[in-house]
Image (tube, rainbow, N blue to C red):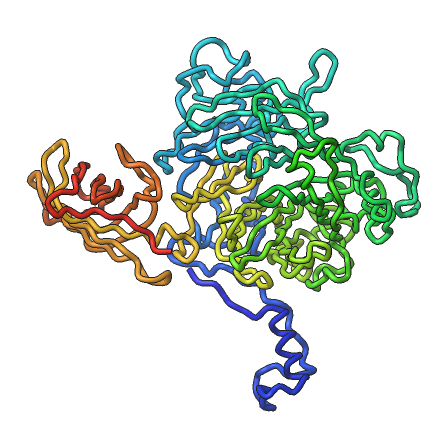
Amino acid sequence: MKTHIGLSMVALATAALIAACGSDDSPVPGTDTPVAGDPIPAKKIDYCEPGPGDQPETGIRGGIPAADRGPARNEVTFKGFWCGARKVAQHKLFDRGAFGDLQLKDRCAYASRRDGAKDALGQPITDQKQYVGTIVFDMKTPTKMAVTPDDDQVGHASFDPAGPNPYGKILRTPAMIRAYSALELQGNIMIGAYKDNGPTVDGKVTNPLDVYDVSDCLHPVPLSTTYNTPQGNHDGWLTPDGKTYYGIPFSGDPIIGRGNVDNGNKNQVVPEAVNRIDMHVTDLSDPRKPKSLLNWNRLDLPQAVQDNLDWKILNTTHFHDVSTNNDGTRVYMALYGGTNSLGGGNKTAIEARTQRCGNGLLIMDSSDIVKRVPNPKLKYISFVSWCDDKQMIDPDFGNGETASAHATEWVRHVNGKEYIVSTEESGGGLGGTPSGICAHQSYARMIDISDEKNPQVVGTYKSDANKPENCEKNLAEDTWAGMTHYLGFDDRSNMRLAVYASAYGGMRFVDWKDPTHPIEVAYYIKERNTSDQMDFTRPDPRYDTENCLYYTGWNQGGLVSVELTNPEYNPCMSRRASVKGKVASAKGSLDVSVEASRNGNGAPAVASMTLKGQGHDAQLTSVTRLGSAIDASGDITATRNSVQIDGNGTFDGKPATFRVLVQDNGNNTGIVSFACTSGCDFSTSGYMDGSGGNKLVVSQKN
């Protein structure tokens, strides 16, 4: 896979400025090099170039045209698009639909449910269905995605009948029934908070929050299942130390009175706004006894911030997302405004326009929370409005009428600096069609917070389907465009790749090595799963660092894992294996020699293998895949000390294909597994004891 490389707007502008200032390197007249006064070309969006095995998009990049979705909505014809990525495995979660969120720990994955009265096949579903809840997966063999057997009743509370759940281990305590974007995991603590407002009990609306010990990831143990947060939980965040939970209700109640006259923030604050909660904070220092720390309302912001008529942050109905830095001393919130019905809850175009600038990033000092100061306060630092003039580095922003701010997540970049990566939801509204397809759609921003009082957008990413110049083609082809929407990273503390779960746009993998110039290096859009609707991806993607796999959920298709096929972005493809000596198996001793490696990110994998014994002679002569042990079996587990080699060769002199797995247990000991995948019927595995000059080493070149 290759990517097209182009100059960023910043680089081009710098070149023009140097020319205007009379640099010694000024271009010679008549050359193609830009000179002062030349128009600066629009920034080029860089995309994945398809390679072998890819099935690239056929229409506008980032969208699905009607011709690909199928001639009729009741036909399953769409086969998906992918470039620079491939699906490793999928589990349809019993066709229950409405994927919630997911978390990874060690060899486990946890998949929750969002909502919905029907399953993925359109059949009615109730909360008493035993597959509703948060499913516990055993990922020892990533390609198999096995639901953990229900070998105990821990965590099931009173929701299930006596005896094991036939669907497997599914956490069904009050919040885990419907844990959406507040399914969070840090260290050995996992929490789930019921989406929005929970069920009514004794005439009172509940908002359950459950706390689990996942130190044994296959056997989560409930620590608390009776705590209720003061309001709902549309989104949430568990701090890296696992001690503090921030919850965001999704309230439809306005802060100020509504109307058809734009009076800025001068409209009278409605009485109930004083008691509303924009964010609540829970102390989990004792995970068995959660307790409330703080209920925060934006009316606690400085009066000058509330009255700022360039922002009008009181006009916007919701906040949406929250994150913190690694030490928890800063909180970053997305004010979910914009000019569409999702963000502002607006009823008129005038109201919508009053909300468009109350859409952006709020930064607050949360040191009081970390220190557990009595009566803690969140202290205002800054607000970044998406329509501030100084943030308009992308000409497509226009007057700032962008989609609703969805995520604002902290990262430490590979360059050592701290940034906020933001995403958006829905269309820009107001212009074009009712869905906003001809207005601004969805942007991702890279925001430099080196000066946190004056953050600055330094880079933006959007797909071609979200570019205004493609409006007419979008309409002509009836394109379903994706959003930047949900967000994941290769490494939040050393970030280079951002992964956007962009609804119908699928998973979009973007290289932010240059924070001013993102490059889309891969994408994956799953096939259609049901006959009556297209599938879309929704929760934050999660990254398995040991096996270099990305996981995300699809509303009808369940849980899907993907691996990147370019070794520059998939470090597991640079693993090396060196084996030489005798392997003792149950069928007898084997003489084994294996060498597999990749010399440089762009180099092809090379591997050789000879296996002799038990009356057979196998020779591996070429490799088709070198990477993590996604097909781990027997005593071999998918971990960073394991490698998988798939390739071609001969078995007893006849053409065959093989799968070789090697696990390094240290001191030249470990396990070697060999299996024919075609052309023969033979498999064996055994241990090497490290004696007599035996060698077994697995390493990874970074």
Give the x, y percent position of residue 387.
Answer: 76, 56
Q: Quadrant of the N terminus?
A: bottom left
Residue 265 occupies quadrant: top right
**As drawn, is 539 to the left or to the right of 570?**
right
Q: Quadrant of the C terminus?
A: bottom left
* Picture layout, residue 28 above or below residue 107: below
Give the x, y percent position of residue 5.
Answer: 51, 67
**As drawn, is 547 to the left or to the right of 652?**
right
Is residue 480 visible from the viewing direction of this image? no
The total of numbered circles placed on residues is 0
In the rendered image, the residue lying farthest to the top is: 162
Q: Residue at x 48, y 21 (%)?
A: 221
Identify which residue, 551 or 385, lies in the foreground. Answer: 385
Give the x, y percent position of residue 157.
Answer: 53, 14
Q: Residue at x 68, y 77 (%)?
A: 39
Give the x, y percent position of residue 412.
Answer: 56, 52
In the rendered image, the residue lying farthest to the left is: 615
Residue 168 occupies quadrant: top left
Is residue 34 visible from the viewing direction of this image? yes
Identify which residue, 601 or 328, lies in the foreground. Answer: 328
In the rendered image, the residue lying farthest to the bottom is: 29
Q: Residue at x 39, y 17 (%)?
A: 151
* Picture layout, residue 431 above or below residue 602: above
* Picture layout, residue 516 above or below residue 169: below
Q: Residue at x 62, y 43 (%)?
A: 324
